[in-house]
Amino acid sequence: MKLLNDKVAIVTGAARGIGEAVALKLAAQGAHIAFTYVSDSSAEKAANLCDKLQDIGVRAKSYQSNAGDFAQSEQFVNDVLKEFGKIDICVNNAGISKDNLLLRMSAEQWDDVMTTNLKSVFNMTKQVIRPMMKAKTGSIINMSSIIGITGNAGQSSYAASKAGIIGFTKSIAKEMGSRNIRCNAIAPGFIETDMTGYLKEGDAAEKYKNGIPLGRFGSGENIADVVVFLASDWSNYITGQVISVCGGLNM
């Protein structure tokens, strides 16, 4: 028996990277997948992911929708409910970084990161809790970051957005616990994705690896494994927690 057989999962920002790995891993455990992508340039990747998911044997549909926009999030969730009939799992994965020292950071750069990383979590969570409350069950999984715990020079906007996700997660867990809706966060460390491609080679890569007790960068699959756990009944007494998946970086 698969852990998520016939569950319906939403994954935002799933056309590549961690989001793609999460969607594939959830599908492998029997979940039907509705996922978002934003830009026209990601349409082909989204279509390819749909094909991969359907080949696994689950229902899958992609939606071009910006989770940072409240109206689009509302429409997306309504469309998913019409198409799939329910929402059991919501993975708030959409995120960007626009790193800069604070002295050089523009207000627009700050706002873009906050909208995509933090407001999107509010938008999506607000929409999915109603059907989850009606069903008296649900798992919301928010993608934070180790940087949201430790901070990092040149990443004040990214760190603030990811720290905000942690506070939001703990608050929603307290609000929704009595309705049997769980809310947890994952804090990835250095994960090999397009966003962290600059870390793969050279002196910088070795420097970062030397600071990781396990001595290597993580993969999207490492994060996806924890998502499956938090989405499943194996974690049905876990809520309001932040699980660091960082190779021991945050100890």
Image (spheres, helix red, strand yellow):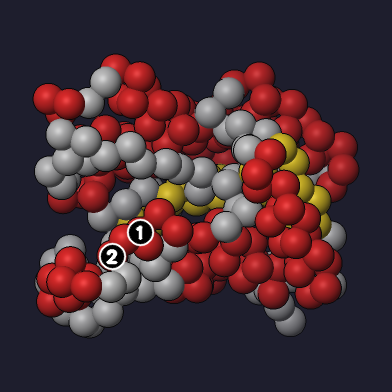
Point out residue 228 in the picture as x, y percentages from the top left corner.
56, 67
Q: Residue furthest front?
A: 202
Circle 1 residues within 10 Å: few <14, some 14–19, many ≥20: few
Q: Secondary structure at mark 1?
A: helix
Q: At x 62% / y 70%, what residue is drawn? A: 25
Quadrant of the frame with the N terminus: bottom right
Given the image, on which type of amino acid does mark 1 rest? Answer: Thr
Q: At x 74% / y 41%, what residue is drawn? A: 63
Q: Is residue 222 above or below residue 72?
A: below
Q: At x 46% / y 33%, what residue is drawn? A: 116
Q: At x 35% / y 19%, what residue is drawn? A: 108
Given the image, on which type of amino acid does mark 2 rest? Answer: Leu
Q: Is residue 78 above or below residue 93?
A: above
Circle 2 residues within 10 Å: few <14, some 14–19, many ≥20: many
In-front residue for pair 215/5? 215
Residue underneath mark 2: 199
Q: Which disc, if any, is residue 196?
A: 1
Give yes or no for contact between labels 1 and 2 (Cβ–Cβ under 8 Å): yes
Point out residue 189 in the picture as x, y percentages from the top left corner.
29, 62
Point out residue 123 in the picture as x, y percentages from the top left corner.
55, 28
Residue 181 seen in the current view: yes
Quadrant of the frame with the C terminus: bottom left
Q: Is residue 211 left or right of residue 143?
A: left
Residue 180 seen in the current view: no
Q: Secondary structure at mark 2?
A: helix
